[in-house]
Image (cartoon, rainbow, N blue to C red):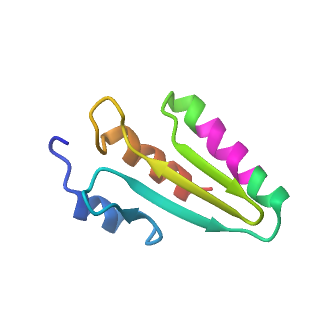
């Protein structure tokens, strides 16, 4: 990953984002009250991802959504991941 200070990036994101041990993945878990709320969040994140043509891995279950951001082409976190995380934080 070139020219990205991950500690600085994390300090600018919602504190619920987690950096993987080998620093190649950003993840965040959302706790919601119902499956419908979780699905609604997934759809909103999906719209953002489509707009940016950068697609996270998403786990959806009753009352939770887990988001995983990594740029597969480079095998790590890129500026695209950071931008998408910032946009997700605004939801």
Which part of the image, by quadrant, shows the N terminus?
top left
Q: Which residue lies furthest to the left in this view?
A: 3
Q: In which quarter of the image is residue 31?
A: bottom right
In the foreground, 39 or 80? 39
Left or right position of 20 against 28: left
Task: Report x, y in % for residue 21.
Answer: 28, 63
Q: Residue at x 59, y 39 (%)?
A: 48
63 lies above or below 83: below
Q: Which residue is drawn at 39% across and 55% down?
A: 26
Q: How many marks?
A: 0
Q: Which residue is drawn at 35% across and 63% down?
A: 12
53 lies above or below 18: above
Task: Report x, y in % for residue 57.
Answer: 53, 43
Left or right position of 57 against 17: right
Left or right position of 84 against 77: right
Task: Report x, y in % for residue 14.
Answer: 46, 67
Which part of the image, by quadrant, shows the C terminus?
bottom right
Q: Does the magenta stretch include residue 21?
A: no
In the foreground, 3 or 72? 72
Task: Report x, y in % for residue 5.
Answer: 19, 55
The segment highlighted magenta reads: 40-48
Q: Residue at x 69, y 53 (%)?
A: 60
Q: Main secondary structure of the magenta part?
A: helix
């Amino acid at each position: 990953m070139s020219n990205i200070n991950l500690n600085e990036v994390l300090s600018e994101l919602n504190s619920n984002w987690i950096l993987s041990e080998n620093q190649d993945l950003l993840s965040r878990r959302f706790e919601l009250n119902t499956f419908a709320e979780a699905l609604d969040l997934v759809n909103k994140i999906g719209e953002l991802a489509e707009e940016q043509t950068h697609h996270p891995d998403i786990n959806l279950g009753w009352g939770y959504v887990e988001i995983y951001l990594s740029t597969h082409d480079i095998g790590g976190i890129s500026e695209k991941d950071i931008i998408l995380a910032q946009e997700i934080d605004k939801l």
